[in-house]
Image: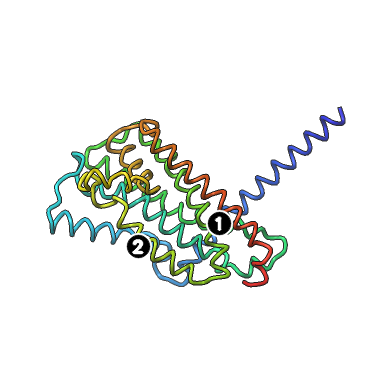
Amino acid sequence: MNMDSTGSMSEQSRFEHYLHTGKVLVQLAKRDFLSKYVGSYLGIIWGFIQPAMTILILWFVFQVGFKQMPVQDVPFILWLMCGMVPWFFFQEAVSGGTTAIVDHGYLVKQVVFRFGFLPIVRIMSAAMVHAVFVVVLLLLFVAYGYNPTLHALQLLYYFGAMSLFILGLTLFTSALVVFARDVGQLIATLLQIWFWITPIFWPLAIIPDRYQLYLKANPLYYIVNGYREALIDKTWFWSHPRLGVGYWCVTFALLGLGIFMFKRLRPHIPDVI
């Protein structure tokens, strides 16, 4: 009886610990999100203005200027936003997660704070803006007469898949940037290249078949294509098992590398920060 009671208390205390940790992460994410716009008149609206303006500019250039035809039998703006919405989250979470520890040096020096959570905080902060854009995206599909189906629920799957990939990447970069600040600039440059090699505003079909295999190896292709298949093609994620297996192999390998690197560097971070 005592053993059962002890075991029950242990499970209860573990649950309470996880619950408390979750609440702390949510509070930190809210604070991190709001702190970006402190002192500005428009406040958090700035978090949506830049992505919205980027979409409008690209739409105007390709839809109005070059008169881009519909892609996959849907208006170009819908096809474009299916790629831009996940990209905005990826870009913000990776760039923010990379500098998470450097930006919160005051927390790193607190012995009781597990600063390994900081990249997660930045991912959660970026997810707040992403959630709003997903809602806007769904409403835009409805406005154009393309009502989402149950396939749209897969957006949660692709969001989770992208978040794990980002976590592995930022655990690695956030620890490394403490010792080599140039990593931050390198990540910014790589993100620009990453954007252009991902079929976000250009369809993969325009690329010769012999090169498509290399572009499909890009993890972001799996995510962007997944958002489009969930809302446009109405295809389930298990329809492409090879792409899925490849993505998750890369993601778990990167996550393992990120955790390993972070654990190796963590003891030295407070001394350098």
Name the residue furthest top. Answer: 1
At 34% from the left and 45% from the top, the residue drawn is: 216
Q: Residues within 10 Å of mark 1 (few under 14, many from 20)?
A: many
Q: Are marks 1 and 2 in contact (CB under 8 Å)?
A: no
Using residue 258 as the reference point, say whether residue 153 is left or right of it: left
Does dot 2 land on a helix, a strand or a loop?
Answer: helix
Mark 2 belongs to which amino acid?
Gln
Q: Which image quarter is the N terminus in?
A: top right
Residue 65: image location, x then y, percent: 13, 59
Q: Secondary structure at mark 1?
A: helix
**Point 69% across, 63% down: residue:** 267
Asked if residue 229 lies left or right of residue 271, the reply is: left
Residue 74: x and y in percent read 20, 41
Between 199 and 236, the one lying in front of the other is 199
* Mark 1 vs 2, N-terminal side: 1
* Vertical position of residue 125 compared to residue 160: above or below: below
Q: Which mark is residue 264?
A: none
Q: Residue at x 68, y 60 (%)?
A: 113
Q: Is residue 82 above or below residue 271?
A: above
The Cα atoms of the two marked residues, 1 and 2, are separated by 20 Å
List x then y, in percent, for residue 107: 64, 66
Residue beneath the point at 39% across and 50% down: 132
> In screen coordinates, is 73 left or right of 127?
left
Q: On the image, which quarter does residue 89 sit in?
A: bottom left
Number of residues whose C-alpha sits closer than 10 Å to that of mark 2, classed few (under 14), some (14–19) or many (20 or more):
few
Q: Nearer the viewer, residue 106 or 161?
A: 161
Residue marked by disc 1: 171
Q: Say which amino acid is labelled 1.
A: Leu
- In-front residue for pair 180/224: 180
Instruction: Return the residue nearer the eye: 238 or 37.
Output: 238
| Residue 212 position within the rendered picture, expressed as x and y whole percent measured from the top left | 28, 45
Q: Disc 2 designates what residue?
A: 192
